[in-house]
Amino acid sequence: MTPKFQHATHFRNFWEKGNGRDLLDWAAVRPEIQTFYKYAPLYHQTDGYGDDAVKETYLKLPYSKANALITKYSEQPIDAKEDVSESLIKLFLQMQDIPAWFDENLADKGARFCMRTGANGLIVLRDFSLMGGYDFAYIGKPLVFTGVLKKGAVKRLKDTLEFWIHVTREGALKPNSYAYQLIVRTRLMHSYARLKIKEKTKDWDITNWGEPINYWDMIATYTGFSLVFMQGLRKLGIQISEQEESGVFHLWKYVGYLLGIPPEFLPDNRQQAVEQFYWWTTLQAAGDNDSAQLAQALLQENLDNTIYKHSFQRRMLLRLHQSMNWYLLDGEINNRLQIPNPGKAFSLFPKMIKKGNYISQKIYLQNVQQYQKLVEMGHLQQQKVLDDYIKHTPKDFHY
């Protein structure tokens, strides 16, 4: 493999004058080609333990029996002598094994930062990390081929929100915790989707797209929850200490490990994160029609969601999210994803948020006690949004 798009217009615009330029300046790195060749094999490598477990459960047993087995060993430890398939034992023993490099105190620093960002964090995740990710055309293909593109964005957003909130709380990642159970579910969902795509799809372009939900795509996804997440928050005036930054990377390194990604490839800092992200984007075409459809589904979610009762409230919410898209993302990306510019009046919204953050941090970043209050308030804000999504997501919705 060699970089495909390093000289393409969309790549150069992003890394020479767009958000990519900001990342390079922030990390103060000059990407070296050796990093590409280190990561390139991951484009065709996937989670063998997860795939084997799915083959022995969801693809072999009645759903109720398969689900009961996965639930049982998600909620309680598994023993190497358990009377179940070897694939399940290997999967859960790997996930139960807490590696020597994992520092729970450092991960908790990252979790506290995620919580203290409050509504800012959720805005950035939605309008920057998630929406911006759609502009990388190939990573979204599994959503297209599994039919998720045509299904409800409300449910998809609720699932992502539930996952993110639960894995970013203090002490959340202990074996058999609720966050751990969500990670098991997500890991096996990835494997199930991958196996079904390979079984049923003749048009999967493995040369250009790699394996479905491959390791490098997964690392890029979780870079969106760490590196890109913090970049977006900086754009909104959020201050990030060195310990908080290290904590966020460490938190997501451990989440990635639990999801089956080889930990030696997961970044420990922004320098490593930016360099691998740079080279990953050399394999990604610019956003295409599928990308635009995913973006439109995310925008439409504002109008479909029933959290707000009145249609005028939903339309207002849509305009506010569009204003954040245009503030956070490069203009070229907004145009490719066909995101309407809501106009000058709404352009004041991101500036108001940034000003509010400046004032809030003047008050709450003065000492440990005030910082903890900010963490608690942010947690409540995020939990309220999740509770609303759980309440208003159709109960009979199934993929």
Image (cartoon, rainbow, N blue to C red):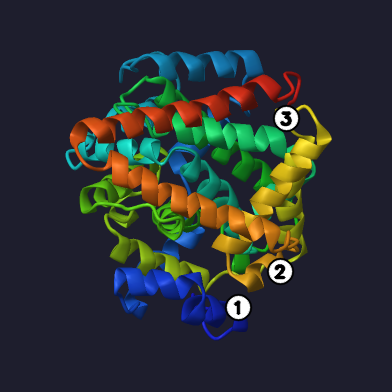
Question: In which image quadrant can residue 65 be found?
Answer: top right
Q: Is residue 168 visible?
A: yes
Which element carries disc 1, helix, strand or loop?
helix
**Image quadrant where one finds the C terminus:** top right
Q: Is residue 215 visible?
A: no
Q: Which mark is residue 308?
A: 3
Which residue is at a point 40% across and 58% down the rendered structure image?
234
User: How far from the left and from the top, in percent, is residue 202?
Assistant: 75, 55
- Does 276 appear above or below 381? below
Q: CA distance from mark 1 to mark 2?
A: 10 Å
- Does 293 appear above or below 83? below
User: How far from the left and from the top, in percent, is residue 96?
Assistant: 31, 27
User: How far from the left and from the top, in percent, is residue 156?
Assistant: 65, 37
Which element carries disc 3, helix, strand or loop?
loop
Q: Is label 1 in contact with label 3 (beta carbons under 8 Å)? A: no
The first of marks 1 and 3 along the sequence is 1
Residue topped by disc 1: 10
Residue topped by disc 2: 336
Which element carries disc 2, helix, strand or loop?
helix
The first of marks 1 and 2 along the sequence is 1
